[in-house]
Image (cartoon, rainbow, N blue to C red):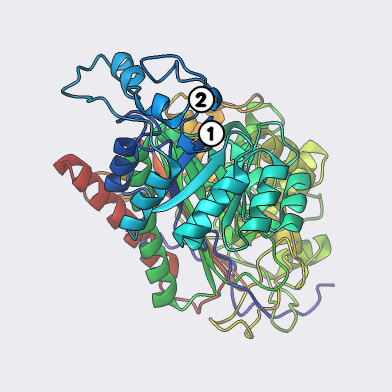
Amino acid sequence: MARRRTLPSVALGCIALGILAAVAPAQIRPAPPWIVAHRGASQEQPENTLPAFRRALELGAQWLECDVFTTADGELVVIHDPSTGRTCDRILPVGDSSLAELRALDASLGFRNAHSLDTDRCPPTEIPTLRELLDLVRSDPRARLTIQPKDDSVAAAAALVKDSGLVDRIAFNDGDLDKLTTARRLLPGATILWDRPADADLAKDAALAKDRGFTALIVHHRAATLEGLASIRSAGLECGVWTVNDPRALAECLARGAQWIYTDAVAEAVKLRDRQLARDRVVMQQREALDLPALAVGILEHGRPTYAAVFGELGPRRGDPLTTRFRIASITKTFTGLLLDTLAAEGVVALDDPVAKHLPPDAALPDECRTVTLTELATHTSGLPRMVPLHGKPGDPYGAPDLDDLLDGLADIRARSEPGERYDYSNLGFALLGLALERAAGVDYAELLQAKVLTPMGLTRTEILDPAPDDPSVARGFQGASPTDEQVPWALGRFAPAGGVAATLPDLCRYAQLHLDAVHDRPLPDGLSAEVLRTVQDERFAIPPQRGAGLGWARVTLGDGTLRVWHNGAVGGFRSLLVMEPDRDRAVVILMNRGFAAGADPCESVVAAVFTRLRDEAAAAQDGR
């Protein structure tokens, strides 16, 4: 006998095909990304010369980086190599030469020859002293300087810095732990940046740097993974990357939360930094306007992440914002749709299989729904209602329904339309789809999704999850903007295929990226089918005049002809939105940890502001600004 139930007061998901046109702040950038001009603007002027340093400041770098050696007569000069042969017109050993001998050299010759310039375009210049460079820094209140002692000159450099009165605008950087420990002891107020190689043990190094009172770990660009940079921030240090010059790599490092960027390509890095700061302002304005505890935004362009930011409050004891998961709610349906298409490609199911074929024999589907196909479930055209009656719990309308709850509830429903006749959003349809796929494959849904979708896609921080309130891996959901208005986590149980995924912002960005990679014929990881990733987005049901449904995805064509493939979501304490524009090869991901009453989706305000920003950037680029 079916047990008595009440309908949930809030239904999972918020898609509407007519609407899309003791807590610590969780900011991944406590300060603007620092652009460090590596040996000055060394792509435009001779490295480690005053013209290179002046040019870097003109371009907008906040920090200058220089190398220092000691001359035979005890002066500190700015040069990278122990010999002058690579950069100057004569070969002299720096440590065995006097300042006067070194000053007689032309420090521009190497750059002049490498760039086929004459002396009019690249005049001769001297090797500068550290004292002169400190004078340049003093003359410009914007300027900061990081010093890399190439010999045993830490104490002498620290003394010059102390005499200059510029300690709070000076850093020391190097890979030598002893040098930096000495610099920290001699100059407690200076910034200390520990440069680490690609094969460094970042967890060990971060703990050691924290113990020594260092400011940041700067890792080789090959080690600048999301996980690596996040582990540094989680240790309470700032993170950075050396030395990055490729524009796409620069954008990716910024998107991964790098706070320090050593670069020769100063102009490009400054441009990308300023673009990121402008995007930050848009995100922070939206967070304030919507009164959100936290707001996460990711942007992908032309196959690469170009922006990722998490601003706000995620809850107590949460880790790094970029490795903290949000519940993505009904975006989960696109994962279930992808699982369906994958299993169909493997021959485990057929897209036109009736769902009854894969359900328990005693599943009490309404007679008119027994012919409903798996595709009709995935496109919300099954005719099934949105939900079945459930018990629920205080604050949680789902209450972890099990298989009996799901199947017993079928006895209480009636079809809303004939299969394939019209679009009616149905969480029940996706719960049944997940069950059907599970039974067809003989594997639990969560395990099946992990094996067929999450692992092949490399989504290492994404999973089906009914989180406990104190789970530190998941952002805390809130009913309102106040950190005291905590939302009881909804336990979706058997409705997980409709809304049970939790993911980090970078993982969800990667998920979108792989769909776009398939559309644009870019290489995919082993085990992924480009055909499946493309066809899952295809229109399976048209909703005139401009809308349609794919396998879990919604589609809309805007007035200017732009196709958007998208899905949004709402689950207790969370909202989400993922929008792809395949023809423009870009996507936007929005995650927030606040619930809202039924009505307009607050994510739409954010995505509209983001696309407006992207349009303004494109217009500025076209105008040459």
- Residue at the spot 68% in from the left edge and 57% down from the top edge: 185
Q: Position of residue 508 (x, y in %)?
A: 56, 48
Label 1 sits on what residue type? Phe
Is 191 displayed left or right of 59 in the figure?
right
Where's residue 88, x and y in %?
38, 19
Identify the residue at image location x=27%, y=46%. Answer: 58
Instruction: Give, as a three-letter code, the residue at label 2.
Output: Val
Numbered mark located on residue 2 in the image: none
Residue tagged 1: 69
Residue 276 placement (x, y as % from top left): 39, 52
Q: How many marks?
A: 2
Label 2 Cα neighbours within 10 Å, binned few <14 / some 14-19 / many ≥20: many
Seen from the viewer's position, the closer of residues 146 and 453 is 146
Which residue is depicted at the point 76% across and 66% down?
A: 471
Q: Please report whichever mark, 1 or 2, sits nearer to the chain's N-terminal start.
A: 1
Q: Say if 166 sits above or below 484 in the image.
A: above
**43, 19: nearer the viewer:** 43
**Residue linked to disc 2:** 94
Secondary structure state at the residue bearing disc 1: strand
When the figure is inspected, residue 4 is found, relative to residue 17, above or below; the finding is: below
